[in-house]
Image (cartoon, rainbow, N blue to C red):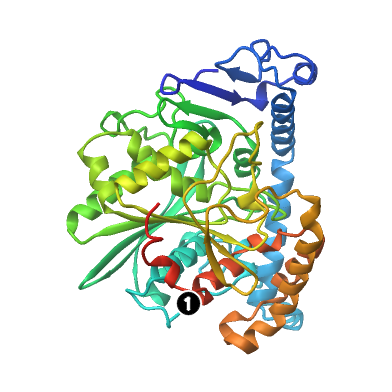
Amino acid sequence: MACDKSFSSNYLLLEPKDVGFFDLIHILFSNNLERRRFVDSFEQTEDEFARRWLIFLSVVVQKLLQLVAKPMAIIGWGIETCLNLFSSNRNLVGLLLDLFRGEDIIPKKDSRAFLSFVGNLDKRVELDKRIKRGDGNYNAALSMMASKISYENKFYIQTAVQDHWKMEFLGSYDFWNDYQGKATTQAFVLRDRSADHDTIVVAFRGTEAFDADAWCTDVDISWYELQGVGKIHGGFMKALGLQKSVGWPEPEEIKQDDSHPAFAYYAIRDMLKKLVLENDKARFIVTGHSLGGALLVDDSAQQLAILFPAVLTFHKGEDSDLLLERLEGVYTFGQPRVGDERFGQYMENKLKEHRVKYFRFVYANDMVPRLPYDDRSLMFKHFGTCLYYNREYEVQVVREEPNKNYFSLRSVIPMMMNAFGELIRSFIIPIKDGPDYIEGSFMKLVRQIGLVIPGAAAHCPQDYVNSTRLGSSKVFLPPNHYI
């Protein structure tokens, strides 16, 4: 594999494109990794069967995703088009009337009104006017709304930021993934500025429901171990800007290749440096949420949000110190585990050293924060302040969410009962808390799916937006400010 791994002290990299059927089967019966063409590992052998089984599963799923990439994209286009057809034409009757009149009823995907699959689950675009600048939950509520609209096209985001939020839209970007050979990492940047307030928000977009490339990043269990840092999920490092030929070069060594878009980490770093130097009061926050496919597994947005400051700490120098000093907070919603215990300890120490606030939001039985498994085989661990919200949006500050590993037989019945309570609540909450909390028929349908797959609907943006608005703001005050 033609990639520079000198920045890491240990690694395990998977390449499904190079796999053959018998080569793949052999990994289940042989501990020899050196002879497997689809595995690039610092260690030549792997004696533990459980880890070889996980490698097998990861490669099989990635291979299947590559095979169905085009059908997935077509199905996704069809579903989103149908949802927008009914939405833009009010209902089925309105759609038929417009069709009869000969009007153009096909929604344009790059229009300001077009909503993604995720956007159709929660169509709210306005910020909660009851939450003001300076309130404890202001940044959290703004971050979640920014994360939610990050799934939409550039023109929708621009309209929401400028016309509805009355803030500055600084751009929406597609960044290069050197390992996929495509621009598959997306983010947008806004500026919330007044006479005494200047906050820049970087919102990474998570896994889109029918994007096979993004799903491959999710299920790829490749990892790199950095000396003195720990093991980090390889797929998300690649999405942030890891380069095949040079790894993580120092920013001043980067030369932009005009044949493809910029790498996320380096482009956002340069942009933030220019912005914070314009104003001594300027601060920035990084955020991300996600929703994947059938709402079943994790994604990249939250990892990119927390990995961005991690890579800042790798690169020493005045620019990195400046940005870490101006980094006001990291807000992730439904974040899966991204590294091992050593990485968690490293990040806690660095965030505390630079006084960076890091809040990891977990709503009820959301399955994504409980993946990948916290066990000997996968080695992934959470770190930082966890804000855990129950079905009533009551919040607790905890080290780890209850039922830390999703697949637990003892939890099935309680989770199903909770999912039923969420479905009932969807009819009651507008009466109790107002029209801003009305749930559409599509979201109610997903709630019903949650009865069969508990924790699936809990990952939707609806509950995370509600948590930041209806939950107590006291948890954002000291002593919960810092790791």
**Rendered position, 347 above or below 24:** below
x and y percentages locating residue 138 in the rendered image: 39, 71
Q: Is residue 350 left or right of residue 74?
A: left
The residue drawn where x is 71% and y is 21% is: 48
The residue drawn where x is 31% and y is 34% is: 315
Q: Amino acid at mark 1?
A: Glu
Q: Is residue 381 left or right of residue 57?
A: left
Which quadrant of the figure has residue 191?
bottom left
Count of numbered badges drawn on the protein: 1
Residue 327 visible? The answer is yes
Residue 101 visible? The answer is no
The residue drawn where x is 66% and y is 14% is: 33
Q: Is residue 91 left or right of residue 204?
A: right
**Rendered position, 367 above or below 353:** below
x and y percentages locating residue 436 in the rendered image: 56, 82
x and y percentages locating residue 370 in the rendered image: 64, 49
Front-most of 109 and 222? 222
Disc 1 residue crowd, few under 14, some 14–19, many 20+, Cα 10 Å: few
x and y percentages locating residue 313 in the rendered image: 33, 38
Front-most of 435 and 231? 231
Front-most of 100 and 464? 464
The residue drawn where x is 18% and y is 59% is: 279
Front-most of 269 and 108? 269
Which quadrant of the figure has residue 135?
bottom left
Which quadrant of the figure has residue 287?
bottom left
Q: In the rendered image, which quarter contains the N terminus?
A: top right
Identify the secondary structure beneath mark 1.
Answer: loop
Residue holding disc 1 = 126
